[in-house]
Image (spheres, helix red, strand yellow):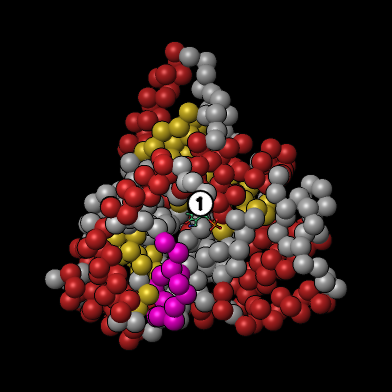
Amino acid sequence: MNFPKNLSDKLETRRQNKSLRILPQPNDLIDFSSNDYIGFSKSEAIFNATHQFLLDYNIKRNGATGSRLISGNHILYTETENYIAQFHQAESALLFNSGYDANVGFFSSVPHKGDLILYDELCHASIRDGIQLSNAKSYKFKHNDFEDLELLIQRCYAERSRSTLLNEIYIVTESVFSMDGDCPNMEELVAVSEKHNCYLVVDEAHALGVFGGKGEGLIQHLQLQDKIFARVMTFGKGLGCHGAVILGSNELKSYLVNFARSFIYTTGLSPHSVATILMGYHHLEKDKIALESLRENIVFFNQVKKMLYLSPLFVRSKSAIQSVIIPGNEKVKSIANALQQNGFDVKAILSPTVPEGQERLRFCIHSYNTKEDITKVLTLLSSFVY
Ligand code: PMP
């Protein structure tokens, strides 16, 4: 079978740029790359509780059987969404099949023609893809730079006075950025958003299970939940399973059920997946040790970084994501390979996933990393970069 030439040319360009993506083989290296921040994906307690829960409810089904609006809305959905809404101090919660689906569904349906979306330039691909599907105008603001954001807002207000086509402004950010691991100053951002009557949307994918007394995320840690129009939590990271939720008002939930196409036109999550999410949340209430170990390891990682004079090479971060910038796909890949050969699973993030010159090694810290392994991997890193 022939393969279209324009596609094979694109693959060839990636090969030449050393940026061709290939699926990695599973390995048993020491994990500094997964999003399983507090080890929930491997929790036997969650696995067993899910199984028992399904038996207790006599739910012996393998799939949802349809979209939630047709036949897929099994009883666990209501219980789980209510539990999650309460846990996150939100009026309501709506489950999506993934964080990707949640962002695409939200941004493609909520902002309308005449509205404006202002998003941080480092927002995740799922947010950008959703924005691309929207009929609203969108502009990016410089990363975590709220002066730049305000300039954009003022420019838009000036335009508004000349046209009737500017209705609502949506500001979009992440509470922990997925590639840099840094956090915006949320208090400042909330103030800017309130000052200009905007709707603030925050993706908390990498904050769930990391920040807050029970891992509720950065927004609740800062007690800002009532100021945010919509929060997106994803379950493939801290919660160790799969799926996502959008938190907001009852009206927002009803709107998404009616208009978010990635919610409407897809089979719902299976009862087993929803039960795993619910048991994951129950476990967050109970397992303080994992959260504490993660936090200790983040502090320890930062201390060792400093001791080895590596801090200036890293993006400043208090989260579980710690990125060291090593420009050039080839160079960063060779250092990642060397770390892997020494037993550590550290992944290189290449351009075009990040802009050229911003290639990096992305360390993900976990509750189950040992202090010895953290010291070893950073010592090795320092021998490769200095
Ligand atoms: N938002 C952010 C910030 C992410 O990092 C990711 C996953 N990389 C997603 C959304 C998508 O979540 P999911 O993996 O559940 O599709």
Secondary structure under tag 1 reads strand
Between 164 and 5, which is closer to the camera in this rendering? Answer: 5
- 23 to the left or right of 70: left
Mark 1 near ligand 1 (CB under 8 Å)?
A: yes
Between 78 and 339, which is closer to the camera in this rendering? Answer: 339
Q: Mark 1 points at which residue?
A: 203
- x, y percentage for residue 54? 78, 74
Magenta run includes residue 32: yes
Dominant secondary structure of the magenta stretch? loop
- x, y percentage for residue 304? 26, 77
- 382 to the left or right of 370: left
Determine the residue positioned at 72% across, 53% down.
267
Between 328 and 186, which is closer to the camera in this rendering? Answer: 328
Identify whether 270 is placed above or below 30.
above
Determine the residue positioned at 22% across, 67% down.
311
The magenta stretch is 22-34
Determine the residue positioned at 29% across, 57% down.
18
Q: Which residue lies furthest to the top in this view?
A: 162
Examine the image and state in which quarter residue 110 appears.
top right
- x, y percentage for residue 354? 34, 51
